[in-house]
Amino acid sequence: LRQLEAGGNQPVDQPIGDAGLASGALRLPDFIDVSFYNGSAQLTLRAQLQLNEIIEVMGRHPQVRVVCTGHADLPGDRKSNLALSRRRAETVRAYLLQSGIAPDRALLNFFGEERASTTGPSDRRVEVRFYLN
């Protein structure tokens, strides 16, 4: 994130933001996937490191907001997967809020298995999507 924000070497499809930010002052990916283990809503060390970077960006740029969208993979029943995706999204949002991020800057959404594309770990995630006020 820091490298993208500073206009680093990695390609970015589009900078997010208004005219003032699109000039290169803030370049972020559209979203970051925070992964979870099968059946778990507990943050991994990697997930915590990703969220710490997001917190750092949000701390420096108060105009940045995020939507935390929980997902689950196909195994299991729909009701359980919906509940699991919600717990995952709540875990990510709670981690952001405990760092001092205002609640209106981290919104919550969840889909369960509704948007699952595979049966593998790529759907065991919370998508953290960036927006500007």
Image: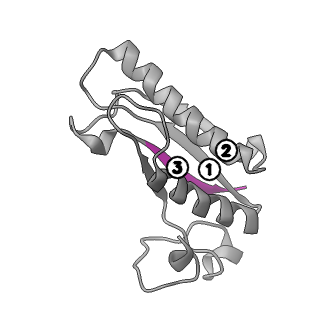
CB-based contact (under 8 Å), mark 2 and mark 1: yes
Whether residue 67 is situated above or below residue 29 in the rendered picture: above
Find disc 2 in the rendering and name its residue: 106
Corner quadrant of residue 93: top right
> Could you classify mark 1 by the number of other residues whose Cα lies within 10 Å: few (under 14), some (14-19), or many (20 or more)?
many
3D distance between C-alphas at marks 1 and 3: 6 Å
- Mark 3 residue crowding within 10 angstroms, few (<14) / some (14–19) / many (20+): many
Distance between the Cα atoms at labels 3 and 2? 9 Å
Choose the circle earlier in sequence order: 1 or 3.
1
| Residue that lies at the very extreme toward the left in this rendered image | 119
**Helix, strand or loop for disc 3:** strand
- What residue is pinned by disc 1? 66
| Residue sitting at x 57%, y 76% | 5
In the depicted view, which residue is nearer to us: 22 or 30?
30
Looking at the image, residue 62 sits to the left or right of residue 123; the answer is right
The secondary structure type at the circle numbered 1 is strand
Residue at numbered disc 3: 128
Q: Quadrant of the C terminus?
A: bottom right
In the foreground, 60 or 111: 60
Residue positioned 39% across, 13% down in the render? 79
Question: Which kind of residue does numbered mark 1 sit on?
Answer: Val
Check disc 2 and give the amino acid type: Ala
Residue at 28%, 42% (x, y): give it: 121
Write the start and end of the magenta stretch as one range: 126-133
CB atoms at circles 1 and 3 under 8 Å apart? yes
Mark 3 and mark 2 lie on one chain; the one further toward the N terminus is 2
Query: Is 64 part of what is drawn in magenta?
Result: no
Task: Residue type at mark 3: give it.
Answer: Val
